[in-house]
Amino acid sequence: MNSVQGLELKNVQKTFGNTQAVSGVSFKVQKGEIVGLLGPSGSGKTTLLEIIAGLIQPDRGVCTWDGEDLADIPTHKRGFGLMFQDFALFPHKNVHENVSFGLLMQDWSSARVSQRVEEVLDLVGLPGFGSREVDTLSGGEKQRVALARSFAPQPRLLMLDEPIGSLDRTLRERLMGEVREILKSMKQTAIYVTHDQKEAFTVADRIVVLQEGTVAQIGTPLEIYHHPDTPFIAQFLGLRNVFPAEIKKVDGQMVISSPFGEWPSQEDRERKVSLLLRPDAVMLGPSPDANHCELRGTLMKKSFTGKAYQAEVDAEGTRLHFTFSSSAEDFPPQGQEITLHFHPSKAFQVFE
Ligand code: ATP
């Protein structure tokens, strides 16, 4: 079979007045895969969901399912499900009535509906919640009911638009892992929209990073985190140590010269670049061997997050941010001069 299984977008474009909301967007979602659409506000995430759902038509490009063009297939015949940030649960109906709504719309028999509602409430960890009124539920429980309702009709593609964005941080951290487990346990094909990189990393198998309506990078969370393609992506992922730098020859030796120091370089061509110093590839203390580079600075701020220290260091007037896994006892006090070391091939990434 030649056609692509699952969803494929090819060169999709949409303009509203003078605003190019999406342009030249192409990506695939394989069956059973969770693809994260990650990008800042206004990068075109919702517009893409609306195009895939058939709520708006693209100006250009095609959207196919199993190789079949979706252009002439209306929203309700696409077999796709949508879940929004505000959950949109019916407040005056109980949990069973909320979850069964889409099934009854699709003319499921009442016996099948009851069985399916129990099944999906079990899946989201809310067995026996059917008769509970929605407005008596906690935020996390409502989110799970909304999730159960969105996948109860077994959509061939489920699209989740910032599904936990309105919840508080602690609850979000817990639920993002649970959402992935639930979707994977059903082998649900899904698109998960978020502007939060941590959420995308936790939930998605692959991530499409959007920037001003175009695809900036596609890859697994590991690929994107370890090899962001551009300084924009690095900074959007929270890798804040990105600075202009220069690769040049000094006394016959190639060096990389940055605002916070100068080190020998393996590069063979002089040029201006952007330099990323990875926050988690730097260690406390002087260099243990000749393969490591040293960096000195003043520890300006530190905060303990439970697993690690987040530290802000002033190096030659430049503020650098690092993450150290270190025990509380041996971490230096704020205001102290510190020496750090790193392996350049692990800590540096050069952008042209
Ligand atoms: P957010 O995370 O804030 O929801 P987003 O990534 O989902 O943002 P979109 O809502 O897709 O971004 O918007 C992309 C661009 O298109 C924005 O500049 C937005 O203002 C514009 N846009 C979207 N819908 C319309 C519309 N109906 N009319 C005019 N402009 C629109």
Image: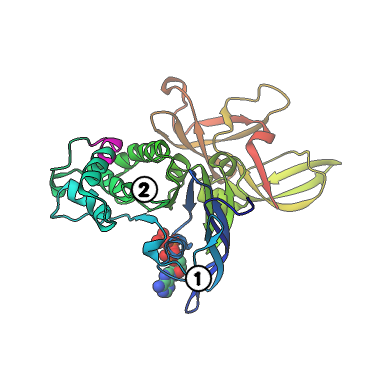
The range drawn in magenta is 120-126
Q: Residue at x 14, y 53 (%)?
A: 93
Q: Mark 2 CB in 8 Å range of ligand 1?
A: no
Query: For this rendering, which residue is in front, 267 or 303?
Result: 267
Specify the quadrant of the image occupied by residue 171.
top left
Question: Where in the figure is residue 38, as x and y percent of width and height?
Answer: 48, 52
Q: Nearer the viewer, mark 2 or mark 1?
A: 2
Query: For this rendering, which residue is in front, 29 or 328?
Result: 29
- Residue 122 in the magenta stretch? The answer is yes
Per the image, label 2 sits on a secondary structure element best described as: loop
Given the image, on which type of amino acid does mark 1 rest?
Answer: Pro
- Residue 135 in the magenta stretch? The answer is no
Q: Ligand 1 lies in which image quarter?
A: bottom left
Relative placement, left or right, of 93 versus 26 is left
Q: Tell me the tag on residue 58.
A: 1
Relative placement, left or right, of 36 versus 344 is left
Q: Tell me which numbered mark, 2 or 1, is placed earlier along the sequence.
A: 1
Per the image, label 1 sits on a secondary structure element best described as: loop
Disc 2 target residue: 154
Tell me the CA gap for discs 2 and 1: 26 Å
